[in-house]
Image (tube, rainbow, N blue to C red):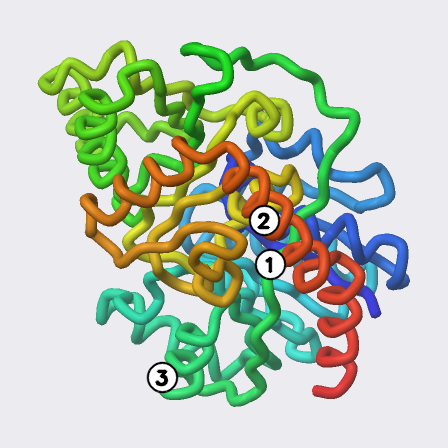
Amino acid sequence: MRILQIIDSLDIGGAEKMAINYANSLASVVAFSGLVATRKEGQLKSQIHTDVNYLFLQKKSAVDVKAILRLRKYCKENNVNHLQAHSSSFFTAFLVKLTLPKINIIWHDHNGLSEFISNKKAVLLQFCSYFFKGIVVVNYQLKNWAEKTLNCKQCIYLPNYTILNPSETKETVLLGNSGKKILCLANFRFQKNHFLLLDVAKKLKLSHPDWSFHLVGKDFNDDYSAKIKQSIVDNSLENSVFIYGSRTDTQNIIEQSDIAILTSQSEGLPVALLEYGLNKKPVVSTKVGEIPMIIKDGINGCIVDNYDDEAFYNSLVKVIDNSDFRTQIGQQLFETITENNSEKAVINNFLNWVNSI
C-alpha cells in the first residue's frame, strides 16, 4: 500500500494531529507513507517523522489548477494508490482523482458537527462521496450520519489515538498556584464552548479562589475570541483564567496541570482527552460525541450533560476536594485509553479494513 495523508494545514488541532499520527504510524508498515499540507504549514510540522515523505502544496484557492497538477505529479512519481483526506481536504482529493481515476479516496471525518453541516457544503460533500472508496469516522453518530447522507457505504468507526512525545522541548510555564491548575486544551472555536468554562470559573472563584483555569489552543482572533476575552474582563477573572494560544509542548503543559477539562458542545473523539488519559490526569467533561464511550462517570472521570454549568461545577468541586478520587480516576482513565485507543490496534484495524474494500 502506498498512502498519502492530505490535510489543509499543520496548525495545532485534532484533525491535524491525527493526519500526522497516521502518516507516522504507517511509515513503518506500508511501502510508502506521505503527507501533504495543502494550504498552510504550522507548528505541527516538526512532529512529522523523517521517514514520512512530505509535500507543502501551497494551494491558493479551492480550485487551484496548478496546485492540483503538482499534486497529481507527486502522486504519479510516488505511485500513490490511496489518498486519505482529512476533514475538508476531501475536495482536493476529489480533484486529484478526476485526473487519476485509479487512485482511491478514503475520507477521514473528524468533524463533530458533520450532522449539522450547511446545505451548500452538504451538497458538495454528497457529490464528492460518489468517488470515495471508504469513509473513516471518529464516533458512531458521524457513522450514522455518513451512512444515511453520503453516497459511499464502506464506512468504519475507528477511534482516535495519540502518541506521547518524550523528546518535546519544554517551553510553556503555566501561571497560577502550584497544585491548583485546571487545563482546557481546545482551539478557540464555538464548538468548544469556552463560555461554559467561564460560567464555571465564576462559581469556582467564589468557592475556591486559589484554583485557576488555563486555556491552551489556537486563538483565531475573531468575534468568538473577542467575546471570551471580554467576558474574562467583565467578570474580573484575569487572575484565574489564563490564555496561552497555540503551543507545541502539549505534554509539558499537561504535566503541569492538576485537573483537565473539556466543555465542548460538539465533538468527534477529542485527541486532548486521549492525551489527558495517557498522562493520568483526572478529567471533567461534557457528554458529547464519543466521550461517553470513554468516560464512565465516577469511575475513570466525571461527565455531565452539555450546557449544564451547575452540574459541571459540582463535578469539578468533587474532584478538587478529594485528592484520592483525583488519583483514582486519573489512573483508571490511563488504563482505559491504553487498552482501547492504542496506536497498534487502530492501525491494524485500519489496514485490514482498507484491504477488505
Quadrant in the picture for the N terminus: bottom right
The residue closer to the viewer here, 319 or 184, is 319
Label count reads: 3
298 to 218, vertically: above or below = below
Q: Quadrant of residue 101?
A: bottom right
Q: Amino acid at mark 3?
A: Thr
**Residue assigned mark 3:** 149
Distance from disc 2 to disc 3, alpha carbons, whole Å, reads: 29 Å
**Residue assigned mark 2:** 274
200 to 207, vertically: above or below = below
Q: Is residue 22 left or right of residue 144?
A: right
Badge 3 marks a residue whose secondary structure is: helix
**Residue assigned mark 1:** 160
Residue 134, position as x, y percentages in the image: 59, 79
Residue positioned 41% across, 47% down in the render: 61
Q: Amino acid at mark 1?
A: Asn
Residue positioned 61% across, 81% down in the render: 133
Badge 2 marks a residue whose secondary structure is: helix
Q: Is residue 322 left or right of residue 328?
A: left
The residue closer to the viewer here, 235 or 229, is 235
